[in-house]
Amino acid sequence: MKYQDDNFYIDRVLSGDVSAYATLVAKHKSLVFSIALRILNNREDAEEIAQDCFLKAYRSLKFFKKKSKFSTWLYRIAYNAAISRTRKKRLEFVPMDNYITQNYSEDKEPETIIGLEDHEQTVLIDRALKGLSDDENLLIALFYKGENSIEEISNITGLSVSNVKVRLHRIRKKLYNEISEIMQQKVNRQ
Amino acid sequence: MVMEENNLNKDDLLGRLIQKSSPDNPSDDFVDRIMEKVQAMPEFSDSKKTIYSYLRSILPFIFLTTVVFLFLFTSDLPFFNYFPGKEYFTQTFVPYFVSFLESFKVLISSKYISFFLTLVFAAGVLIFIEMIFSRRTKDFFLSKGL
């Protein structure tokens, strides 16, 4: 389904068309649920938090100033609600000296992936993503699936911009390694 | 080579692969359940101030204005038939305030009453500060998505 800009639905909700909120929920439910799931590690709790998050966002919609993207605001509500539920510590700060010593680029794309069928690529990336921690999956989801910028992820998670960057670089590197390993295993089996 | 910011490309192979990964989806009736609860909530147009809440919010100002007017109209002091000037200040205004402040002497002559008044004053200040900050922080955090 092709969606309009979030502000279009927000204006409709604020002018009394409550049903427009269903479109906002449908549009963002996957990532809100994903954020909660990565933090809580339990589908039922994640669904409850995701639901609370949408209800809280609805109640507070008139306070939304449209200075940031609605999705960033919503994901931040979800992130904070999930963190509060677990009393888990927030994402950890990564020192910059580690970044400098560990982030020499090995960001090579395994070319063999390109030859795979679509469904094979999906299976492959799902398997590679399982090799990441929940925190890493959360950042990847926000960056790639939520299409948030590094600054927006920084706003959502409370990490500094440079820390988000460092983490994303590391996660990408780790993912490429995971993919290469899986591909290697596949080749060995053949 | 240390990676630069520009290297974080969303549209590379990895980005395209991640877009293909299976999404985390909540249960099928997720949207319906939320909308059921949303429909039960008051509409935004209802959130406008009712007459009762409006009257309640202006009540302190009405009370204060009434007290001031009663004081002015029942006072023996010629508030309305004299334009303030130096003479008015020295002959009327200052003596009035002197007598007004002296009346408080009775209140603070007893240490028990002084203690009690200090407590009431401190509590009043705290309640006032709490009222201001709780309203502001609520709006602030909601607008920030916290």
Image (cartoon, rainbow, N blue to C red):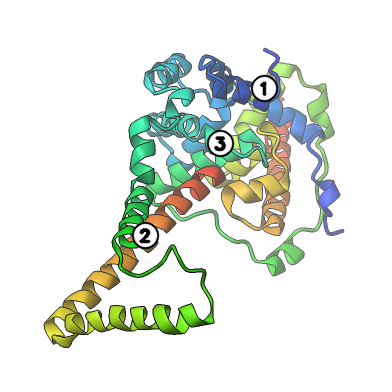
Q: CA distance from mark 1 to mark 3?
A: 16 Å
| Chain letter of disc 3 in the image | A
Nearer the camera: disc 1 or disc 3: 1
Q: Chain of mark 1?
A: A
Q: Nearer the viewer, residue B126 or B53?
A: B53
- Residue A92: quadrant of the picture: bottom right
Element under disc 1: helix
Q: Earlier in the sequence, mark 1 or mark 3?
A: 1
x 53%, y 77%: residue: B85
Residue identifier under label 3: A74
Helix, strand or loop for disc 3: helix
Label 2 belongs to which residue? Answer: B130
Percent position of residue B90, x then y: 45, 84
Kind of residue sitting beneath label 3: Leu
Front of the two marks 1 and 2: 2
The amino acid type of the residue labelled 2 equals Glu
Q: Mark 1 = which residue?
A: A8
Q: Position of residue A65 (x, y in %)?
A: 62, 39
Structural crowding at the residue carrying mark 2, measured as other residues with C-alpha within 10 Å and reported as few (<14), some (14–19) or many (≥20):
few
Q: Residue at x 80, y 58 (%)?
A: A104
Q: Which of B75 and A133 lies nearest the eye of the viewer?
A: B75
Q: Are marks 1 and 3 in contact (CB under 8 Å)?
A: no
Q: CA distance from mark 3 to mark 2?
A: 28 Å
